[in-house]
Image: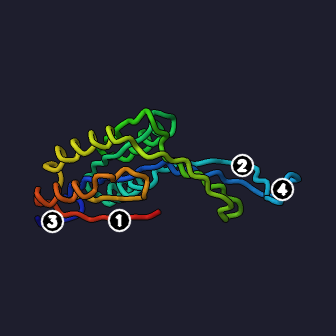
Amino acid sequence: MQVASRSAARLLIVGDVMLDRYWFGDVSRISPEAPVPVVKVARSEERPGGAANVARNVAALGARVSLLSVVGDDEAGRNLQALLAASGIDVSLHIDAEISTTVKLRVIARQQQLLRIDFETTPSHEVLRTKLVEFEARLGECDAVILSDYGKGGLAHISAMIRMARAAGKKSAGGSER
């Protein structure tokens, strides 16, 4: 199927979403406890990360975007949902009460990243199976599928998704980043 333009494109993005947190501050001393810089945090930001960032970027180009993923039943998952809703994305984040939403925390001082701390848990098999059922149901609503794999376990059924997308005659693209 040929898509006439980006603005006419209906894309289904499936993959690992995360909340990217940034703590910005200044370093003026070294800790007396260990030879590490002490960052006095002046401000913080939160941004959609992983497949959520892909969805936000594609939506900013004018495409109609649906995002399908899994988050935990926690503050980070709710913040991610709110950030995505503000971007005009059709968001379906399945809640897995057994996991924490993936969070990447970066500490930055003087435009240099000093530290990244990752919080992540693999989604449960049951929630991923439910997401696969929704994926199949949503295929009729899209022109193409983007599978965005960040190695967090959200695409455990990627082979089945590719088969389903091909059987439905959908274009597909994939990418991974770890």
Q: Is residue 32 left or right of residue 10?
A: right
Q: Identify the amino acid type marked 4.
A: Ala
* Residue 2 drawn at (x, y percent): 12, 67
Between 34 and 41, the residue placed more toward the observer is 34
State which tag comes first along the sequence, 4 or 2.
4
| Residue 41 visible in the shown view | yes
Please identify, in this view, whether the residue under mark 4 or under mark 3 is nearer the observer.
4
Name the mark nearer the viewer: 3 or 1: 1
Work out how far the residue at label 2 is from the one at label 1, CA to CA, in angstroms: 34 Å
**Residue bearing mark 2:** 41
Q: Are marks 3 and 1 in contact (CB under 8 Å)?
A: no
Counting other residues with Cα less than 10 Å from the Cα at mark 1, is it few (<14), some (14-19), or many (20 or more)? few
Callout in the foreground (4, 1): 4
Which residue corresponds to the image point at 47% horizontal and 42% vertical from the top-left?
A: 101
Mark earlier in primary sequence (3, 2): 3
Distance in Å between CA atoms under marks 4 and 1: 39 Å
Q: Residues within 10 Å of mark 4 (few under 14, many from 20)?
A: few
Q: Which residue is mark 4?
A: 34
Tell me which label, 4 or 1, sits earlier in the chain.
4
Q: Which residue is mark 1?
A: 175
Q: Which residue is drawn at the image coordinates 84% and 58% (left, top)?
A: 30
Residue 83, image x and y in percent? 44, 43
Residue at (43% x, 32% y) in the render: 97
* Label 4 vs 3, first from the N-terminus: 3
Q: Nearer the viewer, residue 74 or 163?
A: 163
Residue annotated with mark 3: 4
Label 2 sits on a secondary structure element that is: strand
Viewer-side residue, 169 vs 5:
169
Rendered residue at 32%/43% (across/down): 128
Name the amino acid type tagged 2.
Answer: Val
| Circle nearer the viewer, 3 or 2 | 2
Secondary structure beneath dot 1 equals strand
